[in-house]
Amino acid sequence: MINNKRFSKVGIVGFGGYLPYWRLRVSQIGQTWAKNGIDLEKSLGVEQKAVASVDEDCLTMAAAAAGIAFQRAALAPNKIGAVFVGSESHPYSVKPTGTILADGLGLGNEYFCADLEFACKAGTTALQITAGLIESGLVNYGLAVGSDKSQAEPGDALDFTASAGAAAFILGPREDSLVDILASYSFCSDTPDFWRREGVSFPSHSGRFSGQPGYFYHLENCCQKFLQRIKMKIKDFDYVVFHMPNKKFPARAAKHLGVEGEQLEPGLLVAKIGNPYSASSLLGLIAVLEKAQDRENILLVSYGSGSGSDAFFLRTKKKLLSVQKKAKTINQYLKKNKQIDYLTYLQNYNLIK
Amino acid sequence: MKNPIRKWRNKNKYQYLGKQGEIVSFTKVNNPPLNFGRLPYYIGIIKFPGGGQITGQLVLEGQEPAIGKKAEGVLRIIGQAKDEEIINYGVKFKLV
Amino acid sequence: MKTVVLGAYQTKFGELWDKGLDDLLLEAVQGAIEDAGIDKRKIEIIYIGNKLAGKLLDQNHLSALLGESLGIKTPSVRVEAACASGGMAVAQGCLAVNSGQFQTALAVGVEKMTDLSTEEISSALMTAAGQDEQANGLSFVGLYALLANKYLDKYQAKEEDLAFPAIKNHFHASLNKKAQFPFSLTLDQVVDSPIIARPLKLLHCSPISDGAAAVVLASKEFAKSKERKSVYITASVQRTGSLSLAKRDNLTEIEASSSASQAAYQLAGVSPEDLSLLEVHDCFSIAEIVALEDLGICQRGEAYYLERNGEVKLGGRRPVNVSGGLKACGHPVGATGVKQVVEVYNQLKGRAGERQVKEAKVGLTHNVGGIGGTAVIHILQK
């Protein structure tokens, strides 16, 4: 049971996204596996995915995103009292990404920290935990990151959308915030739609089962129950951001929940970047924050396999406008990138032995 | 650096992250030494306004390297660690 | 100072599959002792120049290894100064004799490299370079490539200019039956060879080699008793430079070489114009170009002209690397510095056969460790 309580003390004081430089067309992947590439692009609604270089990983991307967040926050690094990185591709099974990130950013030695895993919702959970610590007064500022260099078996359905990216959020007191975090909620169950065991390179999934009993059940239930608690309706929100494993799922969920196109569009990055797992909904949120106006309401609902959804009610403030262009924006990543071929992608991901 | 303890001892290892310097010279290493993979990479000597000058790999991402161009420190993986080794994170220089 | 060179010997350099480190050591030492015409027990101290035996062959205690092979109990020590180990061994020998404590000394340089893979050797060679350079995956060729790029940029030289030292040295090696590559190369062959680290190509780089060389040194008193016309080492100078290239303000000069040579000229009472020939450290062709400038043979930025116009070729005004240099004679790392002294000695004694420099009276050897962390210069005179 989660108490129906709002946040009163916490907001976002800095945010930053990172996308690697390389793109791989879904049609390229399709051609390699003798499938009709263009058809796949249409059915998934995904044109290309962002792929990382051989010398990048969850940690290096988290550091890049966090660097941008700090540019917007103008905060002394040692004020951070919590570091939580959510990922499905932490560099180590044992040795936290969080401490290497903290060291790279010069955060000092005093911070709550552990790595998080909950499939694609680990990043939004990092946000919840960090917000909770700030709300309790135990720390003033915290860093929450969702970052993934997603693994997919070459030729498997996931290969067509699994991508790479990172989104970092610095949370702090309302006095300093650009966006207030007003409420959050979660809805979970043990659902076997997607998993990867320790020591195994690629995830497995249950095909179509990931849809109704997975994504839609958790995301829609979470969303509806959340709205009941905070006594709001979909139409009260200027922006709605869902987790985006492809273009179809969030579009269908939107239809079920009565979300309009203009509410969903600004955060819907998946066609151009694919699914960067723990960074998916968070990068959508950053795209929204980089264009939002003062006093706008944002609803974010993530989804992580295994399964669960996190929901957030956020509200923008005037201060947000002054930092939107202060650092590298999602649009800049979308404009400046380069296509590579499937072979180069396989080399970059050490998939050629 | 193969030995993680030697790397850990170097408290200044990230000091050039986010800093911009100028390329003094560079080359492309076509035949990497042991444990640096098989793919070629660029490496250069970068000079900083404060006076420091160091060796570092370059990240190109669409840019052509040249003597005199500016580059900024970014966190990347250096070399290829074996399964039982620590991953070697360090600063590479991305052409701006 | 005046140290007599009593005898000298060089093994063949190359990929010597059936010779181990101990075989090479023995051959060179016995050869030099025989050339000197003295009994092996008259050698009072031995210096063994070697860089890689510990890392590549798990053998460090070379002094005892030689003692075992030669059946002697002579005091002996291994000397290491990266690629200047050989030159450093000769320098230590001169020190010993000039101290008055020893009448004779033997300096031998040896290296056995070809048992291992190119990647392993490449990594081992980097132990001559800085920690940072190693940590970032710089190879030894890459290190000199950084210098080469800066040189080409600074003096508006062309990539093609890098070919000429290699072409010249191969021509010289074609006259040297001890050389690893006793054949000529054309400009096209050099220019078309694969790029190792831009702008350095395969045929700009010295090879991986096995080999050894040794010299017997003696005091004037000891030599008098032998009644021979002597060749002397009239200067033996070492200098230390920065380990890392990045720590230098000027990337296109090797200060250790310049300052060592200036001191050597003073000690020997000669100037660059007096030199009949030079053996310089051409681990890469750019290294020979920079060396000529460091040693005062020409002005900064002019050396690549000299290489083109034949001035430093056999028959020219001031022949450089008539042995074939490191590029064409070969570069068994620890042996090179001693081989250079052997070559100059043979030239001054008039026994260099087809590659004899006419009326050779004064010679200089130039041996460098890493990218100039160490430089050792010797001047020999009749």
Image (spheres, coloured by chain):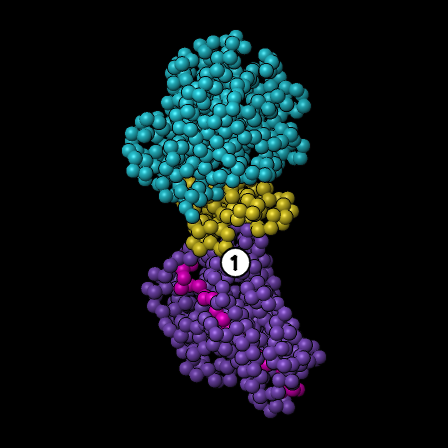
Chain colours: A cyan, B yellow, C purple
Residue A113: % across, % down: 62, 31
C202 falls in the magenta region = yes
Residue at 57%, 63% in the rendered image? C55
Residue at 37%, 37% in the rendered image? A155
**Total numbered badges shown on the rendered structure:** 1
Between C106 and C247, the one nearer to me in the picture: C106
- The image quarter containing residue A250 is top left
Disc 1 target residue? C123
Classify B76 as above or below C107.
Answer: above
Residue at 60%, 91% in the rendered image? C227
Residue C307: % across, % down: 41, 67
Q: Which residues fall within the magenta stretch?
A: C199-223
Between C52 and A40, the one nearer to me in the picture: A40
Residue at the farthest right position: C101
Between C307 and C56, the one nearer to me in the picture: C56
In the rendered view, does C65 fall on the left or right side of C11? right
Classify mark 1: residues with Cα within 10 Å, few (<14), some (14-19) or many (20+).
some
Classify A337 as above or below A14.
Answer: below
Classify A45 as above or below C219.
Answer: above
Can I make out residue A183 in this image? yes
Q: What element carries label 1?
A: helix
- In which quadrant will I find the N terminus of chain C? bottom right
Residue A104: % across, % down: 58, 38
Residue at 51%, 78% in the rendered image? C10
- In which quadrant will I find the C terminus of chain C? bottom right
Can I make out residue C219 in this image? no
A346 falls in the magenta region = no
Residue C284: % across, % down: 46, 63
Identify which amino acid the numbered label 1 is placed on: Ser
Residue at the farthest top position: A231
Q: Which chain carries label 1?
A: C
In the rendered view, does A47 fall on the left or right side of C14? left
